[in-house]
Image (spheres, rainbow, N blue to C red):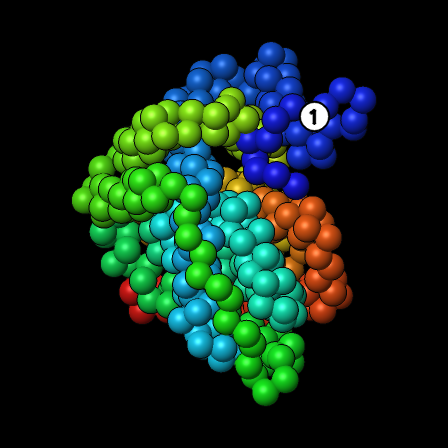
Amino acid sequence: MTAIGDAPTPPGRRPHPLDVIAVGLALAGAACVATGLLPRADAAATLARILPLLIFLGTVVVLAELTAAAGVFDVLATRMARAARGRWPALFALCVGFAALTTIVLNLDTTAVLLTPVMLALAVTLRTAVAPLAVTTVWLANTASLLLPVSNLTNLLASERIGLDPLAYLGVMWLPQLAAIAVTTVLLWWFWWRRDQPPGGRFPPPPTHRPTDAVLYRTALVACLIFVAAILLGAPVGLASAVATGLLLLGFAIRSPGTLRPALLPWRLLVFVTGLFLVIQTIGVHGLNDLVAWLAGDEGGTSGVLRAGGTGALLANLVNNLPAYLAGEAVLPTGDRQRLLALLVGTNVGPLALPWASLATLLWLERCRAARVRVPLARFLLTSTVLAVLGTLAAVGALLLTG
């Protein structure tokens, strides 16, 4: 599979399944509004709320695509492998850090869409097992998405609902994020990297990778640094991503105009998110909110926080993490910050037990299929379920200390 903003399906070929899902959700959302199942005033309020999020999603995916086209990911991956000096445990530590940093800074879908093929190609170049690097990407795409509001769409919703600016949000979520990554790291090594390491724990370091256009490479690095700095300084996320993307677009317009094409725009993701918001809001009004309220309960304290986190993880694996967060947010009081953040932890760290639990996992699976990489499904699902449970418990426990 190619990126979220793929070109239209060529004539005579079947449409991509995610295209069908995105368009179907959009049509269903429009039908909800047209039939009155969702009042137009509520729909208008929802669209006004998500417009800044859609601007952010659209621009940050273009930023990530052009950053990849400039060779940044390829250069970093090969430098990381060379820095490991042929040592398998060192490569493991660097891959974990690389995947976590990409997720934190550029969001989880970027990790799934763009970092996955880089890691798969790196495994082939190193002549090592592919599965450990592939699983590292998808696990950390989910579990490393807590630290900043930009790391996950659900974080943007939660920080807006609770009223936390990026630095205040980071101050609350740093320990839960550290706990989630720590559990992920231990399980990655134990279940995947340890048993698939090459003989003697050594691999041949790859040759140095040099970007095709050094100017575009540096421009991409500067654009990413501007984006991160603007977020940390409290700039609106949509503005930060738009400015950084605008700079990189200008660079490509001058140096490589042929790279710029309409397919860079992630229309599928934008349509998917818009339709999903409208559909879930409609279902919530007609009974889902009552079910989620029963699952989440109304008790406070440690048990209430754990129950909110568990509810988020359970719903995410049943229906997908974004609608799970939206449904939980609708029934939890705005002032109940700890339970709202626990719900967020459950929907970010928990959606790994089943393949459809997060869009990032679906995108990762298709990237693996496109590269003809087969990850043992039973082993993946079993180990991912262990991570979903232990990672959620660890992160929610850490939240009780900081939240």
The kind of secondary structure element at disc 1 is loop
Q: Looking at the picture, does residue 161 appear above or below residue 393?
A: above
Neighbour class for label 1 at 10 Å: few (<14), some, many (≥20)?
A: few
Residue under the point 65% across and 77% down: 196
Q: Looking at the picture, does residue 301 appear above or below residue 51?
A: below
Residue under the point 61% across and 50% down: 364
Q: Say what amino acid the circle numbered 1 marks.
A: Thr
Can residue 59 be seen by looking at this rendering?
A: yes
Along the line of sight, which residue is nearer the eye, 309 or 197? 197
Along the line of sight, which residue is nearer the eye, 381 or 262? 262
Can residue 164 be seen by looking at this rendering?
A: no
Residue under the point 41% across and 29% down: 256
| Position of residue 19 in the picture relative to residue 298 (left or right) | right
Q: Position of residue 294 (x, y in %)?
A: 56, 50
Residue under the point 25% across and 58% down: 171
Q: Position of residue 122 (x, y in %)?
A: 56, 61
Q: Looking at the picture, does residue 121 appear above or below residue 26?
A: below
Q: Position of residue 138 (x, y in %)?
A: 56, 57
Location of mark 1 (residue): 9
Along the line of sight, which residue is nearer the eye, 332 or 108? 108
